[in-house]
């Protein structure tokens, strides 16, 4: 008998197979027990008939999340979660679980985060983790297949790269050191040796932010290229992004559907991506046309909020009437979902008028924040590049534009549907004197950066790179509201358990 994964069921139609997994759900009609089994590759329905007395008796013992071995015959059924179901001959409990704390009833975010080690088992979370895996694999395949060499950069560093205010300090054998904000500075030295390089690892920002886009520990891939200028970086980021989306659409249609993600939004992402200068982006924010569009969107969202409230009220009345257990569970699940969505939209609509007013009053010279990025990215059906930000709003290592020294040759790539920045990068300053001038103007000690300045003393060339935040990419691809679901064990301000 073959031991297979649930994802392989359709290939084994009419065969007798062995599955091992966990009980994700169970219901009984008296003569039939329906077990929903999960094994990490997918879920399937296993039907145990009362006539199979021993199997039926063992199935009756199983509680939610019990581990079990099940033997049965595969029957194709397109209505089933995996396209097939199992007619069960034998049930062997491996471990009968205690009362499982996470049920179909409504659970708050704090409760779910406190039980993240168990919440990961849910169908939604496993779908997200599978997509995350494919995104990471696609990133590595893209760079490995395009002549880049992987370089492992330090996690413990002596100085800041992205601003001293967001550093996690630690004691390094009596010396002050920090957790890395980026591998970029070290990666630049490797680019001068190998030409095309990238690093991929955890990065840390002690940013006291509780927005839906921020984590204190996240994963980032950073390519760096010698003999490259800003147009080269734009093209590389564009190719990488479309390569990632192609992989997800190829492998994860079912997972996207389970998450309620409209795959057509991802299919619409084609090259070339729109390009705006920072100055053009400011004009877009300030325009009457943008204000009118935002007010129309707000009116549509108010109508959507009322529809949700009406649906919630109807469901709350219906569950007071007698109904089958499975229908009650489904209704309670929808009530929970509506409650979360209504709460988010209410807060959003409450803040929206101020965001519209702030956009109209946005002043040239400020860095774009999350609200501005959301407004801009909502105007497009694919990622948009914003380039040439004001010098004072960006890091010391970014090269000034020869045409306009007020701005730097940088890029931010904003994902559509309001997801904002997922890629940030620049052409690096390759002139020793100009880089020294910028370091000193920032109040930084040049002695701490002599090794970095050496790259401009010995064979300096035009070069640049960018960073892609994996968690933000996962959030956009999966259509998630908050990045806390994009990583197995998120580290947030005020949360480090489990």
Image (tube, grey):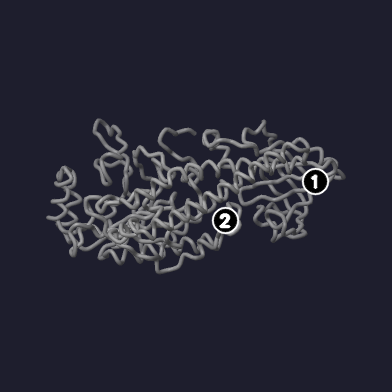
In the rendered structure, find residue 256 and report the number of the disc placed on it.
Answer: 2
Give the image quarter of residue 336. Answer: top right
* Number of dots carrying numbers: 2
Q: Residue 412, relative to residue 219: is it above or below?
A: below
Q: Position of residue 61 (x, y in %)?
A: 76, 35
Q: In the figure, residue 433 lies in which quadrant?
A: bottom left
Residue reaching furthest right?
51
Residue found at x 43% / y 38% = 491
Q: Which residue is mark 1?
A: 48
Q: Is residue 138 left or right of residue 102?
A: left
Q: Nearer the viewer, mark 1 or mark 2?
A: 2
Front-most of residues 335 and 166: 335
* Label 2 Cα crowd, 10 Å radius (few <14 / some 14-19 / many 20+): many
Residue 390 coordinates in the image, percent (x, y)? 24, 54
Residue 13 vs 355, above or below: the answer is: below
Q: Nearer the viewer, residue 15 or 381?
A: 381
As drawn, is 130 to the left or to the right of 190?
Answer: right
SS state under label 2:
helix
Q: Position of residue 290 (x, y in %)?
A: 39, 58
The foreground one among 488 and 350 is 350
Give me the residue at 37% from left, 39% from top: 209
Residue depicted at x 62% and y 32%: 101
In primary-sequence order, the first of circles 1 and 2 is 1
- Residue 64: assigned label: none
Residue neighbourhood size for the residue with mark 1, other residues' Cα within 10 Å, grouped as few (<14), some (14–19), many (≥20): many
The x and y percentages for residue 229 are 26, 65
Is residue 126 rendered to the left or right of residue 465? right
In this view of the protein, can residue 163 be seen by the observer?
A: yes
Image position of 49 with respect to 383: above or below: above
């Amino acid at each position: 008998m073959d031991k297979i994964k649930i994802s392989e069921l359709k290939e084994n139609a009419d065969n007798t197979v062995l599955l091992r997994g966990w009980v994700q759900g169970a219901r009984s009609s008296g003569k039939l027990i329906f077990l929903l089994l999960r094994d990490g590759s997918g879920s399937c329905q296993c039907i145990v008939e009362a006539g199979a007395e021993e199997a039926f008796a063992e199935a009756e013992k199983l509680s939610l999340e019990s581990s079990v071995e099940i033997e049965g015959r595969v029957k194709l059924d397109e209505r089933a979660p995996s396209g097939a179901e199992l007619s069960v001959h034998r049930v062997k409990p491996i471990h009968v679980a205690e009362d499982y704390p996470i049920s179909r009833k409504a659970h708050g975010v704090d409760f779910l985060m406190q039980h993240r080690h168990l919440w990961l088992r849910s169908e939604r979370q496993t779908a997200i983790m599978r997509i995350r895996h494919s995104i990471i694999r696609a990133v590595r395949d893209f760079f490995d297949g395009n002549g880049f060499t992987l370089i492992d950069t330090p996690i413990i560093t002596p100085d800041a790269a992205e601003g001293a205010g967001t550093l996690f300090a630690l004691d390094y054998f009596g010396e002050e050191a920090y957790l890395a904000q980026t591998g970029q500075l070290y990666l630049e030295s490797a680019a001068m040796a190998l030409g095309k390089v990238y690093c991929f690892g955890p990065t840390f920002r002690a940013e006291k932010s509780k927005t839906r886009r921020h984590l204190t520990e996240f994963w980032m891939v950073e390519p760096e290229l010698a003999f490259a200028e800003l147009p080269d970086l734009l093209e590389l980021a564009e190719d990488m992004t479309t390569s990632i989306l192609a992989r997800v659409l190829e492998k994860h249609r079912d997972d996207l559907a389970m998450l309620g993600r409209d795959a057509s939004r991802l299919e619409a992402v084609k090259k070339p991506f729109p390009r705006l200068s920072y100055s053009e982006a400011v004009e877009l924010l300030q325009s009457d046309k943008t204000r009118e569009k935002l007010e129309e969107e707000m009116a549509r969202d108010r109508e959507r909020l009322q529809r949700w409230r009406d649906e919630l009220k109807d469901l709350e009345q219906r569950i007071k009437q007698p109904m089958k257990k499975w229908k009650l569970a489904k209704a309670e699940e929808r009530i929970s979902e509506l409650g979360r969505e209504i709460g988010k939209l209410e807060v959003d609509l409450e803040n929206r008028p101020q965001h519209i007013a702030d956009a109209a009053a946005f002043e040239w010279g400020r860095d774009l924040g999350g609200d501005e990025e959301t407004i801009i990215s909502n105007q497009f059906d694919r990622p948009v590049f914003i380039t040439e930000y004001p010098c004072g709003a960006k890091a010391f290592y970014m090269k000034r534009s020869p045409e306009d020294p007020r701005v730097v040759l940088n890029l931010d790539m904003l994902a559509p549907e309001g997801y904002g920045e997922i890629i940030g990068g620049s052409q690096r300053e390759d002139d020793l004197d100009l880089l020294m001038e910028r370091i000193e103007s920032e109040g930084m000690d040049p002695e701490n950066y002599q090794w970095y300045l050496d790259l401009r003393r010995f064979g300096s060339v035009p070069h640049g790179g960018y960073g892609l935040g994996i968690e933000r990419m996962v959030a956009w691809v999966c259509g998630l509201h908050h990045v806390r679901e994009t990583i197995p064990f998120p580290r947030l301000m005020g949360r480090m358990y489990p």
